[in-house]
C-alpha cells in the first residue's frame, strides 16, 4: 500500500564522528503509529540500537527496513 517512508542517512557536511543518525525500537513504533510503510537506512551510516528488537518489531508491525548504499556525488 501507499504511505510515507523515512530516509535516514548522514547529511552533507554532518560530522559523522560525533553525530550519526540512529534508530531503535521506539522509532519503529512511532513510524507504525504515524502510518509509515518503512524506513530506508544509509548502509554503514546509521546506528541501529537493539537491532534484533528493531527487526522483530518491524516485522510484527508490517514496517520494512532496508539499507541502501549512499552515493555522495
Image (cartoon, helix red, strand yellow):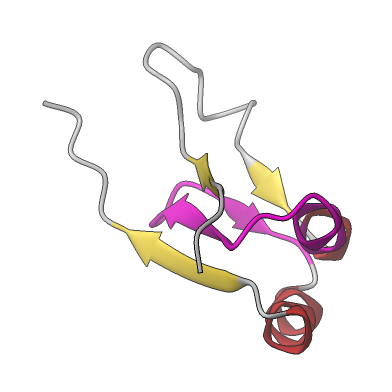
In the rendered view of the protein, which quadrant contains the C terminus?
top left
Total marks placed: 0
- Taking the image as shown, residue 48 lies to the left or right of residue 44, namely right
Quarter holding residue 20: top right
Instruction: Indicate the position of residue 24 as horizontal and vertical percent values.
Output: 78, 59
Instruction: Indicate the position of residue 42 as horizontal and vertical percent values.
Output: 40, 49
Magenta highlight on residue 39: yes
Instruction: Looking at this view, name the residue that lies furthest to the front.
Output: 1
Against 33, residue 53 (above or below) is below
Q: Out of 63 and 73, give the one closest to the viewer.
A: 63
Instruction: Indicate the position of residue 23 as horizontal and vertical percent values.
Output: 71, 52
Against 7, residue 18 (above or below) is above
Instruction: Looking at this view, name the residue that lies furthest to the top.
Output: 13
Instruction: Indicate the position of residue 36 as horizontal and vertical percent values.
Output: 66, 55
Name the residue located 47 percent from the left edge and 55 percent from the top edge: 40
Magenta highlight on residue 29: yes
Name the residue located 46 percent from the left edge and 31 percent from the top edge: 10
Against 63, residue 27 (above or below) is above
Q: Out of 31 and 27, give the one closest to the viewer.
A: 31
Start and end of the magenta stretch?
28-49
Name the residue located 37 percent from the left edge and 16 percent from the top edge: 12
Instruction: Looking at this view, name the residue that lies furthest to the left.
Output: 73
- Taking the image as shown, residue 52 lies to the left or right of residue 67, namely right
Against 51, residue 25 (above or below) is above
Quarter holding residue 70: top left
Amino acid at each position: 500500500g501507499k504511505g510515507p517512508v523515512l530516509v535516514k542517512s548522514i547529511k552533507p557536511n554532518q560530522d559523522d564522528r560525533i553525530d550519526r543518525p540512529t534508530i531503535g525500537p521506539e522509532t519503529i513504533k512511532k513510524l507504525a503509529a504515524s502510518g509509515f510503510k518503512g524506513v530506508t537506512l544509509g548502509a554503514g551510516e546509521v546506528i541501529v540500537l537493539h537491532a534484533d528488537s528493531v527487526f522483530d518489531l518491524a516485522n510484527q508491525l508490517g514496517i520494512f527496513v532496508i539499507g541502501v548504499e549512499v552515493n555522495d556525488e
